[in-house]
Amino acid sequence: MPEIKVTPLGAGQDVGRSCILVSIGGKNIMLDCGMHMGYNDDRRFPDFSYITQNGRLTEFLDCVIISHFHLDHCGALPFMSEMVGYDGPIYMTHPTKAICPILLEDFRKITVDKKGETNFFTSQMIKDCMKKVVPLNLHQTVQVDDELEIKAYYAGHVLGAAMVQIKVGSESVVYTGDYNMTPDRHLGAAWIDKCRPDILISESTYATTIRDSKRCRERDFLKKVHESIERGGKVLIPVFALGRAQELCILLETFWERMNLKAPIYFSTGLTEKANHYYKLFITWTNQKIRKTFVQRNMFEFKHIKAFDRSYADNPGPMVVFATPGMLHAGQSLQIFKKWAGNEKNMVIMPGYCVQGTIGHKILNGQRKLEMEGRSTVRVFNLPFISFDRAVLALDVKLQVEYMSFSAHADAKGIMQLIRMAEPRNMLLVHGEAVKMEFLKGKIEQEFNCHMPANGETATVTTNPSVPVDISLNLLKREMALGGPLPDPKKPRTMHGTLIMKENSLKLVSSEQALKELGLNEHQLRFTCRVQLQDPHSDPDTLNRIYTHLKSVLKGYTIQHLPDGTVMVESIVIKVSSSAEDTSTKVLLLSWSYQTSIKKSGP
């Protein structure tokens, strides 16, 4: 039997470093190629030696598909394509193709220019990698080769995020990437048709969470920001450049306008302009409200939110700052956090998930003393200043730490909603914490088979290839007229008809339509059986007695005594004759026609 194999190189019972290998119908596909925010060593990138110990990956992979621009899904792409070696096609949507290189370059600058790391991809490698990208449109079926085809569906989550269906012959896999089943202030909800894949590979970041109403969360967020501002505190909101940032900016902009507040709101320099540019360029990816009002008012041009300069962090008085990145693992958000952490008037609001190992994860788990790598500068007597890189700095966290989930991931309810939407034969969970995944797996297994392989483990699913057959409308109408239950996709139902193969496609039609389409004559078969009984009467008397008996017991049937000495019950003919050896032994000949017409060419 055919098999589909799925092996996570990253995001197997873990969040971060998404990279899933799928083998289907003799094809090998890599789904996402991300980095892990919690590591700075070899564990940061997926272990590509699983695919091959030496040599390039091109001959082992048919294509690579990137679901969206977040670094935990695309951060290892230049490393994989340029340093390990891959020359094949890389598929992603148009917005992802536009935004991905910008975030990769920011990541490279932080890692190489600021931290001084070596053995890392260069700016040129990012450009060379992006030359291999083939852009995808939503709902467009793309033929990778003669057998492999892919199709993208809207995933919500962030601008340009897509779920993807992979098909080889009758076998198929759907990979969700990250998705959100709830529409928000700037993006719509994820959607997929009832494609019934052999495997649905779904993220499970919030596998055990069912969120409260979005309106309640927004009200609590605004209340906490307002209270902190009123007491003269500073509020840090770590975000990624595009996505939750725009969502929360729209929320604060509206609140500041309504309340006539004067405290400044800042956003990391340059990112507001970039965000504006991409939301204008890809306005069709936003929700219906923004598309409708875009001509009158661009929701992403903010009156109260200004560009941030690092010197502003030392300004007295209250302020709100959106700074990147979102997990406090590096960059401007971490620098501001270090400055503000010692003042209990200040507040940090974490609006999304933080992977293990990041500062965000540590403070959310109650850690109030942090040891951080930093640059220490001292002066010894009259000698010049001396810098010590990677000095360990102790930091006391006194500011308020709040977690308010504005994450654009599906919660447990949303995951089940997508499963019912797609109706897969098997489920496979990735991008989640093992304990939480195990809980959700138990729920899913009440309806579907479910797998949750760890990194490096392979889940194998045996498929039962189905042969697609079109059914004529007339045949369906005839079946419905016969009564019985309505068609149910989960329950098989027998259909009677003639199967025609034309131009490599199969069609089930009525016998009459088949004869007409194929230009054939109809032939009829009759079946006969012999029954012996003892009766001393003459043959006509025996037949007459049979006729009388049948009339009395078969009330609802048409029974005729014909002049040719036969009795007919509907289409069944009965004839009586005596045995040559013994006239009291009667032989009954029963003959009936086969109800379905048999086709045969010729006269």
Image (cartoon, rainbow, N blue to C red):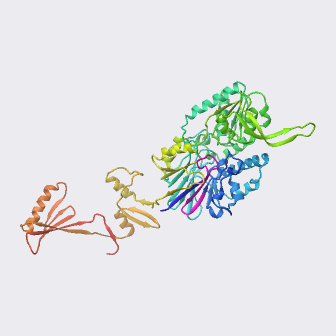
**Residue for point 14% across, 59% down:** 550
Judging depth in this view, the residue of 57 and 501 nearest the camera is 57
In-image side of 200 versus 313 (left or right): left
Per the image, is 20 magenta?
yes
The magenta-colored residue range is 8-29
In the displayed structure, 252 sits above or below 425; it is above
**Residue for point 70% across, 24% down:** 231
**Residue for point 19% across, 57% down:** 557
Judging depth in this view, the residue of 577 and 405 nearest the camera is 405
**Is residue 581 among the parts visible in the rendering?**
yes
**Is residue 297 among the parts visible in the rendering?**
no
Give how far across and how far down residue 445 sits, in percent.
47, 47
Q: Quadrant of residue 539?
A: bottom left
Per the image, is 198 magenta?
no
User: Which of the image's four quarters has the C terminus?
Assistant: bottom left
- How many numbered marks have been drawn onto this rendered protein structure? 0
Q: Quadrant of residue 466?
A: bottom left
In-image side of 2 versus 129 (left or right): left
In-image side of 333 versus 560 (left or right): right
Give how far across and how far down residue 243 sits, in percent.
65, 42
Q: Quadrant of residue 573?
A: bottom left
In the displayed structure, 380 sits above or below 590; it is above
Give how far across and how far down residue 95 sits, in percent.
65, 49
Q: Residue furthest right?
A: 382
Give how far across and how far down residue 21 sits, in percent.
59, 56
In-image side of 281 versus 539 (left or right): right
